[in-house]
């Protein structure tokens, strides 16, 4: 068994494998010690134990954790399918090019890896791939007027919807974290994915602000790399308001404009402005509200 090759192969599927196992430096130290401390025959058993601890096993997951992970898997399927279809769309071949295309390809890889990881953790309890039921125009298969009719032909619309998905994902993972606290391994893995979603959201916002599609002084077309207040309804006010608004109940899931943390009104009790107080925290969002947002893209 070549341990380093094995880890390299796993890393292709799960870029955060080192963080799940241990800090990178420490885990390589452990690997170096394997050859000295264990007989060759015992190495596979030790490796198996280590990965079982890192990922958990579906048979040991509670019904609540399975529900949360399948909820996360639904969102990851949605995001992965969005980028897969967008990068294949003829209408974006000439407009989504260069570094912008490379960046979206990287995000696509992350989302597909998240799907693979969650399916691996859930095993037989994973939901079936719902990709065939997605309609990213928001027309629900033609049952209503499309919300984003040019999503795969207009790069500006494509990036706006991408930002909406990533901003939703950040709040969804934060909202689900409390329900995963009974399993530290799963909780840590979910929060690792949460951080990746946050980086995606920030980068997409930067792309929208700096790209040729940005309109000067237009907040909806040139957002900051972070969320300020309720983002004035997001990239498509009237359609994306719910992504930045309160969940249910609002007392537990306040809007992104919230400035009260741990019972303290930060803006009122410091020199920090209301905008900056809201920018410092992403607020969690409950499962029902997230699924309601996602339902706009399900037939």
Image (spheres, rainbow, N blue to C red):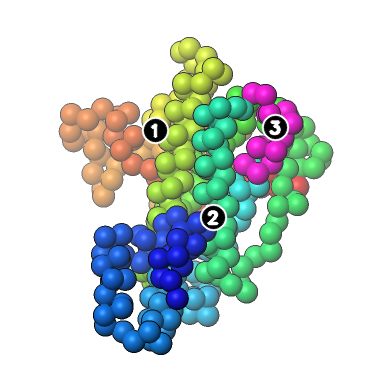
Residue drawn 65% across the image and 47% down it? 81
Instruction: Name the element at disc 1.
Output: loop
In depth, the one of 207 and 97 nearer the eye is 97
Q: What numbered label is drawn on residue 152?
A: 3
Q: CA distance from mark 3 to mark 2?
A: 23 Å
User: Where is the N terminus found, in terms of image quarters?
Assistant: bottom left
Q: What numbered label is drawn on residue 226?
A: 1
Q: Give the residues drawn in magenta, as a range.
A: 83-95
Residue drawn 40% across the image and 45% down it? 283
Instruction: Name the front one of labels 3 and 2.
Output: 2
Q: Is residue 67 above or below residue 144?
A: below
Residue 19 lies in what quarter of the image?
bottom left
Q: Is residue 255 above or below residue 35?
A: above
Q: Is residue 259 magenta?
A: no
In depth, the one of 240 and 170 nearer the eye is 170
Q: Pick whichever of labels 3 and 2 is earlier in the sequence.
A: 2
Q: Pick whichever of labels 1 and 3 is earlier in the sequence.
A: 3
Main secondary structure along the magenta-highlighted residues:
helix
Query: Badge 2 is on which residue?
Result: 113
């Amino acid at each position: 068994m070549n341990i380093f090759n094995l880890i390299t192969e796993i890393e292709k599927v799960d870029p955060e494998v080192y963080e799940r196992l241990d800090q990178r430096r420490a885990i390589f130290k452990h690997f170096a010690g394997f050859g000295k401390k264990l007989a060759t025959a015992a190495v596979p058993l030790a490796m198996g134990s280590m990965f079982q601890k890192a990922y958990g096993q579906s048979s040991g997951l509670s019904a609540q954790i399975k529900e949360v992970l399948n909820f996360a898997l639904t969102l990851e399927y949605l995001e992965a399918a969005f980028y897969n279809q967008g990068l294949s769309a003829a209408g974006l071949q000439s407009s989504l090019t260069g570094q912008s295309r490379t960046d979206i390809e990287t995000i696509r890889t992350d989302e597909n890896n998240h799907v693979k990881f969650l399916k691996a953790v859930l095993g037989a309890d994973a939901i079936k791939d719902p990709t065939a039921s997605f309609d990213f125009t928001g027309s629900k298969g033609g049952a209503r007027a499309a919300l984003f009719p040019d999503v795969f032909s207009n790069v500006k619309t494509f990036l706006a919807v991408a930002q909406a998905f990533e901003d939703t994902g950040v709040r969804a993972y934060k909202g689900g974290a409390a329900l995963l606290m009974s399993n530290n391994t799963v909780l840590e893995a979910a929060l690792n994915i949460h951080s990746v979603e946050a980086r995606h959201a920030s980068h997409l916002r930067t792309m929208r602000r700096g790209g040729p599609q940005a309109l000067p002084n237009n907040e909806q077309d040139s957002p900051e790399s972070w969320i300020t207040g309720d983002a004035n309804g997001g990239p498509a006010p009237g359609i994306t308001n719910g992504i930045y608004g309160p969940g249910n109940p609002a007392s537990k899931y306040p809007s992104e404009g919230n400035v009260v943390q741990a019972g303290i009104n930060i803006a009122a009790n410091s020199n920090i402005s209301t905008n900056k107080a809201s920018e410092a925290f992403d607020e969690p969002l409950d499962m029902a509200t997230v699924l309601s947002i996602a339902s706009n893209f399900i037939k």
